[in-house]
């Protein structure tokens, strides 16, 4: 491979690392053509960008980045595919489907500004909540007390109305 081509690939990988806030390093060694094609389709449907890369080029892209990815350098062995995503837990949920087969297996991940190294971190990554899920939970928690106050006020208003109506209908 010519140096110009390598430089182009490193630059493209660097752009993807900046574009996507989360990525997973996955070992796809045991996948045949059909299974790889199926994995790519599932990634596309889940809005995951899958790229098979040379480890040395990815290492150079990491070095060129503003973020220190040195924790991931040890994972750059064998065949590596990078799953780029905007939602941290989506690739982990996708990889859990393949957990019984063992392929593809998680090497490492960078999600929610944290490093996860090793296949044993897959369950932890799958349980991460996305930004939208956290916001929805916070909104639900904030709405709950307000709804309780409103229902108490409404039921109290009905009680007072009932008492006043009874008193008004009572003969003197």
Image (spheres, helix red, strand yellow):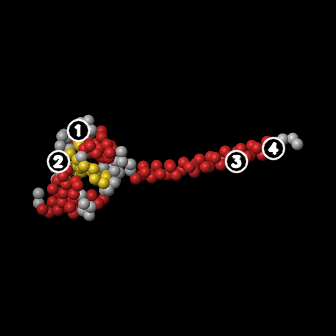
User: Are circles 2 and 1 on residues that touch, CB within 8 Å?
Assistant: no
- Category of crowding for the residue at label 4, using alpha-carbon neighbours closer than 10 angstroms: few (below 14), some (14–19), many (at least 20): few
Q: Kindly indicate the quadrant of the structure image that contains residue 13.
A: bottom left
Q: Which circle marks residue 167 in the picture?
A: 4
In the picture of the structure, the residue carrying the numbered disc 1 is 102
* Residue sitting at x 18%, y 40%: 30
In the picture of the structure, the residue carrying the numbered disc 2 is 79
> Is any part of residue 157 visible from this angle?
yes
Q: Nearer the viewer, mark 3 or mark 1?
A: 3
User: Are circles 4 and 2 on residues that touch, CB within 8 Å?
Assistant: no
Position of 75 relative to 10 (above/below): above
Q: Which circle marks residue 157 in the picture?
A: 3
Mark 3 or 2, nearer chain start: 2
- Category of crowding for the residue at label 1, using alpha-carbon neighbours closer than 10 angstroms: few (below 14), some (14–19), many (at least 20): some
Cα–Cα gap, marks 3 and 1 = 62 Å
Mark 4 or 2, nearer chain start: 2
Residue 35 percent location from the top left of the image? 23, 39
């Amino acid at each position: 491979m010519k140096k110009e081509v390598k430089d182009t690939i490193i630059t493209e990988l660097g752009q993807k690392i900046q574009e996507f806030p989360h990525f997973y390093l996955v070992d796809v060694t045991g996948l045949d053509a059909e299974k790889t094609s199926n994995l790519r389709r599932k990634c596309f449907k889940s809005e995951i960008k899958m790229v098979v890369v040379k480890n040395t080029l990815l290492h150079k892209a990491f070095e060129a980045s503003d973020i220190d990815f040195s924790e991931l350098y040890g994972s750059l062995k064998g065949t590596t595919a990078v799953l780029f995503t905007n939602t941290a837990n989506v690739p982990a949920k996708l990889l859990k489907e393949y957990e019984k087969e063992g392929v593809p297996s998680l090497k490492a991940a960078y999600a929610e500004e944290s490093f996860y190294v090793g296949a044993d971190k897959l369950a932890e990554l799958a349980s991460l909540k996305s930004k939208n899920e956290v916001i929805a939970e916070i909104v639900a928690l904030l709405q709950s007390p307000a709804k309780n106050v409103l229902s108490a006020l409404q039921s109290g208003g009905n009680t007072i109305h009932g008492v006043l109506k009874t008193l008004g209908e009572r003969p003197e």
